[in-house]
Structure formats: structure tokens, C-alpha cells
Image (cartoon, rainbow, N blue to C red):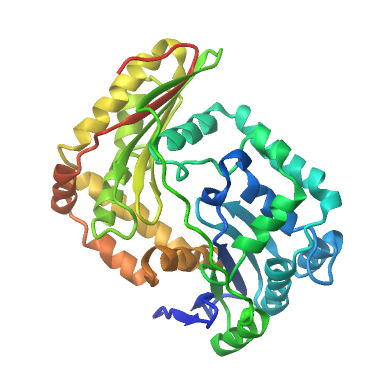
Amino acid sequence: MKQTIETHTFANGLVLVAEPMQSLESAAFTFLVPSGCVFDPHDRSGLAALSCEMALRGAGERDSRRFIEDLENLGVQRGESIGAVHTGYSGATLAKNLPPTLAIYADMLRRAHLPGDQLDAGRQVVIQELRAIEDDPSHKVMLELKRRHYPDPWGQPSEGEMQALEAIEIGEVEWHYKQLYRPNGTILGVAGRIDWPQLVDQIGELLGDWEPREADEPAEGATGPKLDHLTQESNQTQIGIAYPSVPYRHPDYFQASGAVGVLSGGMSSRLFTEVREKRGLCYSVYASYHTHRDRACVLCYAGTTSPRAQETLDVTLEQLKLLAKGVRPEELNRLKTRVKSSLVMQQESSSARSGAVARDWYHLGRVRTLDEVGQLVDALTDTSINRYLAEHPPADFTIVTLGPEPLKV
């Protein structure tokens, strides 16, 4: 079935982008609101996360309890996330329940109560998420890796910092909401069984007169040290490695992403085979792609016992450098099979597509259909990936370790 992508930009700057999927009974939405953690003041890290939590505590005619109950009565499976640039609000429900669900979220975006008497309760929710990181050293080392690899504030953790969270006052939450929850820069992605003209009319009624506001772009600072160690008494050592890559909007993105897929994707990938299976050096090892709109990197992780940490780091770096010599045809064939399986599953998920169309619009100013992505994947060859690797070999590593002793590079 041919995919259709519909788009409409309202006069206030709000972008509505949708993919009708009439074979489904569900509909899903993703709001990307330009209020991410890069806008947190340096002494208020976590303000975006706390503001997101507070915005859900009543809006319009609904108090905090009724807000949640009404969404539950509509069968909405919802989620929230804080990214570098955006706060994400997403949900999925039966298609017939999408209009009243969007009306509730429109209230939240424009008329949130932000009740001061619930600030401490909201703060504790965010603090509990932050404390969970301390119990997950693998997560912690990767957060600290991004903080050092990217220039400030692009590596700032969305979870915030304890001292800053404890100091945030309700007036600062109100300021963040008033300044950054705005239509210009907001993207609404919708996918599933929808009527496009009716959807445009409804969003126009709900959000068409939402007043736009300008906001200052965050100033860019310096990157952190290229090699750093965080001391933690433990029998384990966590290793994080990052190196620069091209962002999603770059013409060579699929070559770069394909190389990472060969490096880490399934039990036949190079890192799993060489670092874990053949040598038994670690209990977990992987690489993943991380992209902002104008910059990106490859993030690598290995978790191991402290006595084997140095060898694990050495072998992992060796595999990264060997990648520059190229990928083999059989590795590429396995990668294409995995990617195509993922595309098939996306075709069956309104939630996956609502998020994808919103993110595509942010990065590209348009949406790639699954057919287009499939064609780009089909066009990958070991020659094209190897050309990319010859021009962009893994290098300029940022390395962060967490454990009892620092490692040598």
C-alpha cells in the first residue's frame, strides 16, 4: 500500500505532519515541544524535566486527578521524554478517541495549572529517576560520556542534577513553561486511522490561535576532557567511548549508520563476536548512533570485571580502528535483513510512525516514507560504506571509565 504523508503549517508556526494508516484501528500522536534540557540554566539542570512533570498535574478544567483519569478512560497509552531540544508528549489510543485526547493535550500545552502545592511531589518524581541512575552504573557512564563529548549544553543530562533540582522554585517552572511551551518550533506527528481534513480543522481550533513567542538559542560552550575516570569502588568497570559521526540529515548518514550496524547489531556483530564471544572479556558490549540535528556521534559501551577492564578497552578500541579497513559483503547482507525487519514492524505500529514523522520533520524539514528508507537501505553496498569509512575512520575518541582504577589509552 502506498504511503501518504500529509503536512500543514499553521500561521503561528505549529507544524502538523501525519501518516494515514487506514488498515489500523489505532491512532497515535507525538508532540515535540521546543523546551528540552539545552535550555536549562546552568544552575537549574533538570528544570525541563520538572516542568514536564508539573505540566501533567492539571490543565484547563481538569485538576491533576481528573487529567489522568480522563486519559485513562480514553484508553490512552502515554509517555513523556526529555531530549536535548524537545520535551516529548506521546500517546496511542483507539482512533475514535484521538480527538478528545488531543483536546486534553491542547489544554496541557496552553493552560497547565502548574500547582505550587504539588511542586515538592513533582520534584520527588524527578529525583527518584535521577537516583535510579546511581544504581545503574552503565547508564551513568554513558551520560557522563555524552556530557564530555558534546560541547556544553548539548551533552547535558536531561535528568538534571540533585542540587539544582532541590533548588528549583515554582516561579522558575512557570517561567520555563511560559517562555518555551509555544507553537513556533512545536511539531505534532500523528499516524494511524485518521481523517486528514478533520484533523487539520481540529488542531486549528485547538491550537491555531496559540500565541507564538521567541526564545534565545542556547550558547555553545566547550567540550569536556577526552579521557576521564570516575572513581567508584566496585568489582566492575564501565567503559564508554564516543567518536564523531555525521548527523541524520547528512547525505552519508545511511553509510555511517550501516557501519555502526556491522559493528554492533545482533550476536554476529563485530563487537559481540570479538570482545565478548571469542575472548569472554565482558558481559555487555554495544555501539549505537546518537544524533542531534547538526552533530552526531557513535557511542560505545563495555561492562566488564575490573581485572579485565584494561584488556577490554584495548580490544574494543582495536575493533573500532579495524572498522576503518572496511566491511564485508556478508556483514552488510545481515545488516540489511535486520533493518528491513524493523521497517516491516514500523508499518504495523502507529506509535512508531507518529514519532518517526515528527522527528523526520525536525531533522529534515520533510518526512521519509518507509518505502524511501527501504530504497536507501537497498542502495547500500560494501563499496559505499567502505568509501565512507575511508573518509571518516573512527578517531578522535572521548573515553570515560567508571570503576576502581583508571585505565590507560
Quarter where residue 301 is shown: top left
Picture layout, residue 194 above or below residue 306:
below
Q: Quick one: quadrant of the C terminus? A: top left
Residue 86 visible in the picture: yes
Q: Observer-nearest residue: 18 or 53?
A: 53
Quarter where residue 399 is shown: top left
Percent position (x, y) of residue 72? 78, 64
| Residue at 63% from the left image edge and 43% from the top image edge | 46
| Residue at 28% from the left image edge and 58% from the top image edge | 250
Percent position (x, y) of residue 403? 49, 17
Q: Observer-nearest residue: 35 or 390?
A: 35
Percent position (x, y) of residue 148? 42, 33
Residue 279 visible in the picture: no
| Residue at 72% from the left image edge and 59% from the top image edge | 55
Percent position (x, y) of residue 85? 50, 55
Q: Classify residue 174 as left or right of residue 287.
A: right
Picture layout, residue 388 above or below residue 314:
below
Q: Classify residue 363 as left or right of residue 336.
A: right
